[in-house]
């Protein structure tokens, strides 16, 4: 069994990693760190894990992370860039669920994240952890930057159209809706049920840090400039992201767009292109690693509309991280991830 460590084990993505890895056939979680809960049993904080783990949270400085084959950082932005290099230099492989290694342009990164980067050399070496694009590079990577949650739903929704001359790449609009767990366990008051319930609100409309991340990937794949307006919304649910993306047409599609999507994702274990006239729901992916999507051309008009859904904690974070781990460690890509969504 390969040994796995989780830094930031008390958070939503940390405990989701444990849920997915508890019965993984080829790895064992041997350390979960917490500054505030060290010494407490993991299943005492999260009774959902009773009977599935005997682990006790350890102080970040005391866990034997260097003895692990792979360590996940499920910590706020700015932690992995300081703490991961010491492990990487000892040969440990790392997956960062935060944004520290996602953006290649360090000026752009500093502008959006408000700090100087602490390990710029590793930014260059990091592989962006979107398996649908970079599967081979992820296999050989020592450091993987796991994509953002809004980013995963939106990027997968439009990838098949990138670089096609009949799509206007300059006026793409992505309108996303997120459940409150997207902001993490230690989030601000606006995600409390009394604040987020019975209400929908736009946030970061003037600019969200996931915009440059989506743009970075789309520009690379389309090999042209991308104009993207991205506006997220907080909606009263716990898990889930829905991204509705509007792409203006500048000519007649050169082929049947439904078939184009089906062909593009035909071999992907975690992308489901739904039949024509479908409407994906977040509940259809609740708890699993699928990105489910549907493509429409309303009234045969000048616009394509793609709707995609993911569970922000699974394909948007911990599940995608496990998919990346499976690739890095040579396991079956779907190990630990063959899950049916909860319904209702
Ligand atoms: N929630 C989501 O849907 C998604 C989250 N992400 C990203 O994943 C990361 C984790 O998110 P999430 O689990 O939601 O966050 P949480 O707020 O739920 O958890 C954060 C964890 O980090 C630990 N932590 C906080 N500060 C430090 C520190 N200075 N040093 C070490 N550990 C620290 C906390 O543990 P303790 O205080 O006990 O030490 C806690 O376990 C974030 O970067 C987030 O942006 C990415 C995609 C989706
Ligand atoms: C609802 C909510 O507040 N969501 C968070 C998502 C944060 C997140 O997960 O950001 P990374 O993926 O970049 O780590 C937000 O939009 O800021």
Image (cartoon, helix red, strand yellow):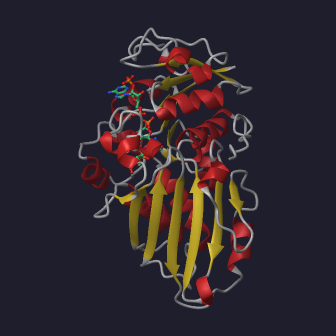
In the picture shown, does residue 74 fall above or below 150? above
User: Looking at this view, is 177 or 122 the one in front?
Assistant: 177
Viewer can see residue 201: yes
Q: Residue at x 38, y 70 (%)?
A: 229
Query: Relative to residue 116, is residue 320 drawn left or right?
Result: right
Viewer can see residue 100: no
Q: Quadrant of residue 308?
A: bottom right
Q: Residue at x 59, y 47 (%)?
A: 315
Q: Residue at x 64, y 72 (%)?
A: 295
Residue found farthest to the top: 39
User: Looking at this view, is 239 or 99 the one in front?
Assistant: 239
In the picture shown, does residue 264 fall above or below 53? below
Q: Measured from the top left, where is residue 298 in percent x and y?
A: 59, 83
Query: Relative to residue 104, is residue 108 drawn left or right?
Result: left
Q: Quadrant of residue 226?
A: bottom left
Q: Residue at x 72, y 65 (%)?
A: 274
User: Looking at this view, is 14 or 320 the one in front?
Assistant: 14
Query: Relative to residue 17, is residue 25 drawn left or right?
Result: right
Q: How many marks?
A: 0
Q: Measured from the top left, where is residue 192 in percent x and y?
A: 37, 40
In the picture shown, does residue 270 fall above or below 92? below
In the picture shown, does residue 225 fall above or below 319? below
Q: Quadrant of residue 230?
A: bottom left
User: Looking at this view, is 186 or 236 the one in front?
Assistant: 236
Q: Measured from the top left, where is residue 170 in percent x and y?
A: 42, 78
Q: Quadrant of the N terminus?
A: top right
Q: Measured from the top left, where is residue 174 in percent x and y?
A: 46, 67
Ligand 1's image quarter is: top left
């Amino acid at each position: 069994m390969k040994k796995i460590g989780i830094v930031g084990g008390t958070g939503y993505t940390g405990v989701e990693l444990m849920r997915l890895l508890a019965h993984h056939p080829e790895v064992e979680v041997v350390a979960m760190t917490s500054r505030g809960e060290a010494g407490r049993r993991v299943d005492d904080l999260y009774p959902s894990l009773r009977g599935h783990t005997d682990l006790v949270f350890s102080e970040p400085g005391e866990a034997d992370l260097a003895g692990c084959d792979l360590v996940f950082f499920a910590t706020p932005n700015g932690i992995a860039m300081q703490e991961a290099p010491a492990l990487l230099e000892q040969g440990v492989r790392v997956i960062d669920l935060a944004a520290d290694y996602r953006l290649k342009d360090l000026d752009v990164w500093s502008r959006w994240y408000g700090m100087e980067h602490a390990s710029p050399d590793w930014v260059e070496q990091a592989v962006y952890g979107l398996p649908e694009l970079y599967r081979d590079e992820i296999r050989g990577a020592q450091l993987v930057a796991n994509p953002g949650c809004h980013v995963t739903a939106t990027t997968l929704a439009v990838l098949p159209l990138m670089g096609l001359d009949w799509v206007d790449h300059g006026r793409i609009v992505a309108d996303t809706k997120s459940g409150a767990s997207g902001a993490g366990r230690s989030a601000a008051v606006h995600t409390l049920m009394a604040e987020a319930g019975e209400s929908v609100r736009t946030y970061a409309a003037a600019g969200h840090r996931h915009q440059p991340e989506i743009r970075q990937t789309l520009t690379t794949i389309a090999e042209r400039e991308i104009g993207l307006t991205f506006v997220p919304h907080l909606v009263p649910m716990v898990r889930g992201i829905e991204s509705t993306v509007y792409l203006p047409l500048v000519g007649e599609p050169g082929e049947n767009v439904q078939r184009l999507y089906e062909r593009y994702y035909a071999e992907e274990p975690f992308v489901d292109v739904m039949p024509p006239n479908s409407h994906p729901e977040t509940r259809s992916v609740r708890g699993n690693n699928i990105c489910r999507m549907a493509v429409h051309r309303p009234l045969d008009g000048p616009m394509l509309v793609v709707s995609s859904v993911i569970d922000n904690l699974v394909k948007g974070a911990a599940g995608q991280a496990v998919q990346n781990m499976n690739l890095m460690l040579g396991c079956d890509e779907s190990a630990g991830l063959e899950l049916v969504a909860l319904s209702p």
